[in-house]
Image (tube, helix red, strand yellow):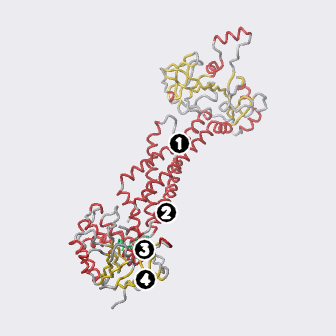
Amino acid sequence: MAAPLVELRGIAKTYGRGEAAVHALTDTDLQVYPGQVVGLLGPSGSGKTTLLNLIGCIVEPTRGRLDLDGETVYDGRWLRSDLRRLRLEKIGFIFQFHNLLPFLTAEENVAVALDLAGVPGAEARRRARALLDYLEVGHRSATLPSRLSGGEAQRVAIARALANRPRIILADEPTAALDSGRAAMVMDLLRRLAIEQQAAILVVTHDETIFGRFDGTVTLRDGRVVPNG
Amino acid sequence: MNLALRDVRHNLGRFLLTCLGLSLLLGVVLSMIGIYRGLVDEALTLVRAPGADLWIVESGTRGPFAEASRIPGDTRDAVARLAGVAAAGSLTFQSVETAHRGRTLRLYVVGYEQGRPGEPKRLAAGRPITRSHYEMLAERRAGLEIGERVRLGRDFYEVVGLTEGIVASGGDPVVHLTLKDSQRLQFELDPPAARRELARGASPAGLDTVNAVVARMLPGVPAAGVAAEAARWKHLGALTQEDQEGLLLKSVVEKARRQIGLFTGILLAVSAVVIALILYTLTMDKVKAIATLKLIGAPDRTIVALIVQQALAMGSIGWGTGTLLILLAKDHFPRRLLLLPEDALMLGAAVLVLCVAASGLGVRLALKVDPATALGG
Ligand SMILES: Nc1ncnc2c1ncn2[C@@H]1O[C@H](COP(=O)(O)OP(=O)(O)OP(=O)(O)O)[C@@H](O)[C@H]1O
Ligand SMILES: [Mg+2]
């Protein structure tokens, strides 16, 4: 098997300190390989979002080591200074609430990610358009987010997450706002991406109807990975 | 992709309303500066009108504008005889108020000698005074028409010509009379008082008094030298044209300048606070969008540009509209508004600097936004 795209060794996260300290995650080991879609399950407050934020370099770990795409980015401290650049190039985020920029049209919302990566305007628009077509929301390109349905907005957000062809995709309850038909469609899409782009995909979900669609699942409880079975 | 522009387009109504408010504020600032410039300019019109090089006034005074000054009427002859003097003329100055066509008319009366320095050089309409009594020249803004008769003191005067742009430092329009008429207006006692003086045995008050004598130098003769010469007369003082202008600016305009300077400063500070607050709230509304931008990898400079560009746009639009408003409205101000291009440009530059500084608060907020807030449900 190829080298893991995401590798966590002994990662821990404690919010706050002293009396108020919350041990959101303790000694977590995790590996996700290219082409894998991994489900992240667990009750509310078990540390799922925290885990995604750590992998996305949004939250600094308290301890441990994090490797992304073969590069050690955290080992007791950040080893890269431009974490935003890292996110731009390697990581795509899909949120529960779509988080589109309200003042940009669907197409511009996707193009902005390309624009930030230095893709020239016309090319960025062309690619944005192609991605929206691929996700079957091309006909809504010129629409502002406030006029999109939940499913449409979520697909635009997915298009944006995919714009720079990231190898790591982190999705926090991507199907929570969708009906089961749409949810299945999004999961099919993620699966296709994992295969076509050899991406590593981590999906946080409470949605039992999609549990069967993962290559593997990781269950968290009180900040610890519980063995499957 | 310009995010600032798209965000503005999305909130166009609010943005334009803010710009309008700012433009009114800046319009007021600009009109303040314009009023000050107008004030200075108008204050000088009267002292510049005679085209004099030298002013002879009462000894020990800084007359005739900053202080009262009275000198004998024959001073003019003596001054004209000084070496280097080309021509000299006597002048009187006084404020009068009269009822005319049912309203109160405040005028500033200048008496001059026909054919001598102090006579208005250009008329906007009508003819110069030709008779030695009961004719007057009026400044256009007095609202008098040629042929109209106006009562000043005990006599009626007919408007025969109109001047333009000669006003007193207080803004009152200037009317010109012959020296004789103006002396009677200023110094002649009314009949009961005169009879009483006579009964008392006092000699009738001499009418031949003037407030100042102005002189023009021969080409190449410095006024300062002649001023020193003239000052040797114990009862007279002498001021060069420069001295006189300086005095007038100091005594008449200085307070107004400080006042207007203060107001301008306060208004600019208010503008800065308003801009800062608006930018701050605009940024607050965008916190989630900013967090999302950071999350998908936008560098700080993209986010700072988003805010600063909007600030600059707001400042430029506000300044442009404000300037336009004042250009359109300036003739409707009760006092003259002198709009200098350099003042408008200076204000523009100040506003841009202000905008960048005022956006600091918003920028600080934006830079502190934690990308993780974009994830929160
Ligand atoms: N920024 C924070 N500061 C302090 N405590 C936090 C912070 N974020 C999360 N926590 C705490 O860490 C623990 C794990 O939170 P996390 O958001 O990772 O849970 P989750 O599994 O995503 O829950 P949910 O299913 O409700 O989204 C919780 O007890 C939470 O209160
Ligand atoms: Mg969560």
Q: Which mark is residue A58?
A: 3
Residue at 47% in and 66% down: B368
Residue at 70% in and 23% down: B73
Q: In what element is the residue under mark 2? A: helix
Do residues under tags 2 and 4 come within 8 Å of each other at their CB atoms? no
Instruction: State left or right for residue B162 relative to residue B94.
Output: left
- Which circle's residue, 4 or 3, is located before the other in the chain? 4
Q: Distance of mark 2 from mark 1, alpha carbons?
A: 33 Å
| Residue that carries the numbered disc 1 in the rendered image | B32
Residue A113 in percent (x, y) is at 36, 71
| Rendered view: A32 above or below A185 | below
| Residue that carries the numbered disc 2 in the rendered image | B364
| Residue that carries the numbered disc 4 in the rendered image | A27
Q: Find out if the beta carbon at label 1 lies less than 8 Å from the nearest ligand 1 atom.
A: no
Residue A40 in percent (x, y) is at 32, 79
Residue positioned most to the top: B199
